[in-house]
Image (cartoon, helix red, strand yellow):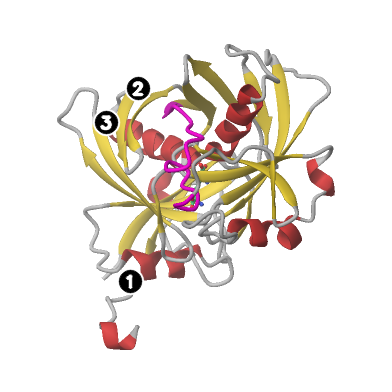
Amino acid sequence: MSIEFEKFHGTGNDFVVVDADEYVPDRGAFAREVCDRRDGVRLTDGGAADGGATTAPTDSVGADGALFLALEPKFSPPRAVMTLVQPDGSTAAMCGNGARCAAKWAAERTGADTVMLDTQAGTRRAEISDDEVTIEMGAPSFAPGDVPLAPDREQPLVEETVEGVEVTAVNTGVPHAVAFVEDVDEVDLDAVAPAVRHADAFPEGANVTFASRRSEAGDGDTVAFDQRTYERGVEGETSACGTGAVAIAAVARRAGEIDGDASVGVFPPGGRLGVTFRGERASLTGPAEREFTGEISSTPEPRRVSEA
Ligand SMILES: N[C@H](CCC[C@H](N)C(=O)O)C(=O)O
């Protein structure tokens, strides 16, 4: 049994997108398999033909996650239920770049330029233009129960040292530990981030995001930051992370470093993301592109519990 997929990326954060109507009995096993950068997604013959492929990789390309999308086209605007299953088989409640890809996917199928996405972090409205998607990201929360922090914790975790790194904890749909440093490129992410990601302070783990302020902003931004994020579930650095970009802006805002209505440019290795706020609610803007389509020839069947 083969499964059709479309490969998208949002600022280099890349996803295998699968219509929820496809028969995938074990999504965790599927994601583990297709996201593998050594043995994961391959194009089958003809896979590029119907997708207007811009690239046709012959080798495995892997992905940062598998997005399962259940389209409900009868609503106006159309809706889609989004589930992100990560390379380790876990699900994440929200993904800013994945949501922008999901919105683009739904827009291509329906012709709509506004799409409502139902995520585990809430319903998010997305506006799609030719090359960019803007998505509502809700109000970032520093509340201990929302991040979440350890159950006995009553105060937000702000500028505290966790495993040797000074971080502030915020939930922007998923938990992030944000550290401001002089130069993100000087950080040995694989050396320092895993301990923070697994720290007792974060009972459900955390994505670990480093940021440094650029001396000058461009592109109409009031302020700009460089970003590098080590992601839970990927267990490594990704080329971009949308919830992380919002987390940087939210922490800088809380610290009084930027004005409430600032237009914030965030630069992960994969490009530029824009973050703005209306009141406490954030929006995220950036490119979302379909790269190619393909088929995966088989999907792992669910394992019996005794084999797991
Ligand atoms: N890359 C995503 C975030 C995924 C978060 C996930 N790694 C987790 O919380 O476990 C983004 O663009 O926002």
- Position in image of residue 216 (x %, y %): 81, 20
Looking at the image, residue 2 lies above or below residue 145:
below
262 or 77: which is nearer to us?
262
Query: Is residue 239 something one can see in this rendering?
Result: yes
Residue that numbered label 2 is attached to: 113
The Cα atoms of the two marked residues, 1 and 3, are separated by: 28 Å
Q: Amino acid at mark 1?
A: Thr
Label 2 residue SS? loop
What range is drawn magenta here? 135-152
Q: Let me know if residue 93 is in the magenta part.
A: no
Q: Amino acid at mark 2?
A: Asp
Label 1 residue SS? loop
CB contact under 8 Å: marks 1 and 2: no
Looking at the image, residue 144 lies above or below residue 203:
above
Q: What label sits on residue 110 in the rendered view?
A: 3
Point 73% across, 50% down: residue: 165
- Position in image of residue 147 (x %, y %): 48, 43
